[in-house]
Amino acid sequence: MRYAIHLAYNGTNYCGWQTQPNLPTVQLTLEQAISTLLRKPVAIVGCGRTDTGVHASDFYAHFNIDDSIEPDNMAFKLNSFLPSDISIYNIFRVSDNFHARFSALSRTYQYHVSNTRLPFAEGQYCRIYFEPDIDAMNEAAKVLMEYDDFTSFAKLHTDNKTNICHLSKACWDKAVDIKTGKMEFVFTITSNRFLRNMVRSVTGTLLDIGRGKLDVDGLRAIIEKKDRCAAGVSMPAQGLFLTNVDYHWNDFLINDENNNI
């Protein structure tokens, strides 16, 4: 039987999602917890491979077991067992053709920056030291939507078979705290897939536009060069969140009264 897990995690204390030898990862921590509760080894497949320090407020994984479980009870026990920086929203039955990674239609990431100190968001945003021109960055974000080859924003020497990504959203928003006047700038980007470090390098390049170091024509030139060295810096991991993963749930949910996504 195949079960899906809906979860969230703060990535600060982890070397990413994917299991790595002798390093703390979210996947390893979750596999150890489930295997302990079920008293048998359980392998888990995640919807993506977030890097070291990256967070996820919306993440899915799946696992297979021979025997049925009571999903709500299992979720409750896992939340009691796991460290406080990983939270299980729920667990539910899915069909055998559901795959947490390959069945996903799109993923949405958000990157958070602020030019003021945000003590209650420590470790969850990146501090910048200028006020970015959000209108200029949004004009540049529209340009991203005109392209599908993002080689210039891909980490070098990876095993990508293609650097083609189909974006459906790219925009900046500004939030202002009425009491303090503190501002946070959030970049949201949605695509069917992402390349390693793509969001962080795109964000860094758009911030170059926001500070007047680059213009829209320069962005076009960077994209069309298909050269990672032409793009801006890759922003630090702590400001990045995976915030939404979309599926055709009607194709995968098992008709079970315990199912609740």
Image (spheres, rainbow, N blue to C red):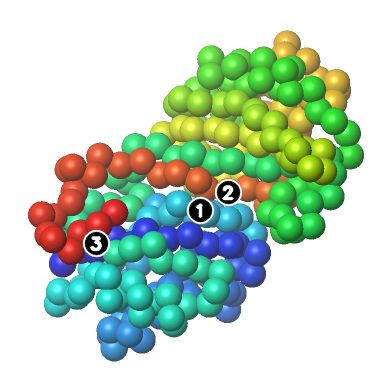
**Residue of label 1:** 57
The residue pinned by badge 3 equals 92
User: Spatial distance from mark 2 to mark 3, Cα to Cα?
Assistant: 24 Å
- Estimate the spatial distance between the alpha carbons at disc 1 and disc 2, rounded to whole Å: 7 Å
Q: Position of residue 177 (x, y in %)?
A: 74, 40
Instruction: Tell me, yes or no, whether the two marked residues, 1 and 2, touch with CB atoms within 8 Å.
Output: yes
Say few, some or many: other residues with alpha carbon within 10 Å of mark 1 (under 14 / 14 to 19 / 20 or more). Answer: some
Q: Earlier in the sequence, mark 1 or mark 2?
A: 1
Q: How many marks?
A: 3
At label 2, counting other C-alpha atoms closer than 10 Å, the crowd grade (few under 14, some 14-19, many 20 or more) is many
Callout 1: SS:
strand
Mark linked to residue 241: 2
Q: Nearer the viewer, residue 10 or 64?
A: 10
Is 230 left or right of 164, judged from the image as shown?
right
Marks 1 and 3 sit apart, C-alpha to C-alpha, by 18 Å
**Picture residue at 65% right of the left edge, 28% below the top:** 172
Mark seen at residue 42: none
- Closer to us: 157 or 189: 189
Crowding near pointer 3: few (<14 within 10 Å), some, many (20+)? many
Whether the residues at callouts 1 and 3 have beta carbons within 8 Å, the answer is no
Q: Report the quarter where the N terminus lies.
A: bottom left
Mark toward the start of the polypeptide (2 vs 3): 3
Residue at the right extreme, as displayed: 129
Q: Residue at x 46, y 32 (%)?
A: 191
Residue 148: give x, y in percent of width and height.
50, 22
Point 64% across, 59% down: residue: 53
